[in-house]
Image: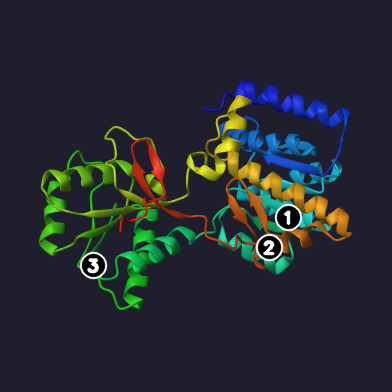
Amino acid sequence: MINLRGIAAFLALLGAAAESNAAGVMIGVVAPQNGPLALLGAQIAAGAGFEIQQSGNTLVAINETCEENSGAAVADALVNAKVQVAVGFLCSETLEGALPKLKDANIPAITVSVRSRILMEDALKNGWPLFRAAPADGAEAAKVIEVILKDWAADPIALIEDGTIHGRELTEAVRNALEQNGLKPVFTDTYRPGQEQQIALVRRLKRAGATRVFIGGDRNDVAVISRDAKAENIPLSILGGDAMRAANQPLPLADGVRAVALPEYALLPESAATADALRAKGVEPEGYVLPSLAAALIAGQAGQAAAAAGKPLQEMLLGTTFQTPVGTIAFTGAHELSQNPYRLLEWRGNGFFPPAAPTQ
């Protein structure tokens, strides 16, 4: 876990360096510095701050309160600090008020968190300089659908969900897509979450003939269903969603359970060197750390390219492919990620990893 006191000291050193020797691209880092969101803010600040220091750019830290009508003050602070680009932005409340002023100042904003489709639609309509380095609303469902159509189309499929808004909407999006492709699940149901056992449910899945089941529910419910299916000798291939990224307790998840989720980037081979460098600075590369580092890298490279070409920084964001520790990133003309960041992952031992290649 990130130590907030250690991160505060780290950022203080960065701030002192920036004041004494401002250089390179001036990058605003907008993140909560106190209150209930301070831990997430520390992750954003640590990742972005590490990259800004490594690249010789200048960090300007701006507190984000995430309160209604707080965005205009954030924009004023960025403008007054003469930043060229800003990253972070945990909350949509900040962006709603900041973007009009950032447009006037030609300061692009790269959010690592906000997924609102409506906000992006408003940004495109009004010419606001918003770029999303986070998945868009609907990206999780799109990846689940892609995986099921690719891997399960020939098999009897069940769709079950836990009755929550997210679980229901995700599963309904999958069901609609399957039906549009001529596939009808052999079983659909809403189960009661938080139960110690789900034997009756897995027996109903067996009677329906299902061998593949998508579960729109949380990690512990999936663990219970997987355990009870194994105990009843019912072969089920189980797929969950991003809610699977949670503590592996109280019941450990069985190896082989799959999820469509954002990866734990620190577990991926392409992120290993950066993760080790962060740990050497006392920063655990969890949560928003590596995505924020990638956003700061993009901001810095776009700023340098814009200066060299004599073009607006926003233009370089749209016209460049960036190699980052979380993978290759490019923005579409709609300012969204060109590639869906959700991946098919499989639980093995102590984390979610890319599924092993099938043996020939």
Along the line of sight, the residue nearer the viewer: 325 or 295: 325
The residue that mark 1 highlights is 99
Depth check: give the residue in front, 174 or 90.
174
Quadrant in the picture for the C terminus: bottom left
Type of amino acid under label 2: Ala
Secondary structure at badge 2 equals helix
Numbered disc 1: secondary structure: helix
Residue at 34 percent of width and 35 percent of height: 248
* 31 on left or right of 143: right
Marks 1/2: CA–CA distance:
8 Å
Number of labels in the image equals: 3
Q: Residues within 10 Å of mark 3 (few under 14, many from 20)?
A: some
Q: Nearer the viewer, mark 1 or mark 3?
A: 3
Lower sequence index among marks 1 and 3: 1
Q: Which residue is mark 3?
A: 155
Task: Give the amino acid at mark 1.
Answer: Leu
User: Label 1, label 3: how many angstroms apart (C-alpha)?
Assistant: 47 Å
Query: Which is closer to the viewer, label 3 or label 2?
Result: 3
Q: Judge by depth and name the residue closer to the eye, 73 or 282.
A: 282
Which quarter of the figure has residue 126?
Answer: bottom right
Up-down relation of residue 98 to residue 349 (above or below): below
Q: x and y percent of residue 286 in the render?
A: 53, 36
- Name the residue rendered at 65%, 41% in the picture: 293
159 sits to left or right of 283: left
Left or right placement of residue 218 versus residue 210 in this view? right
Instruction: Give the CA separation, mark 3 to mark 2.
Output: 42 Å
Residue corresponding to mark 2: 123
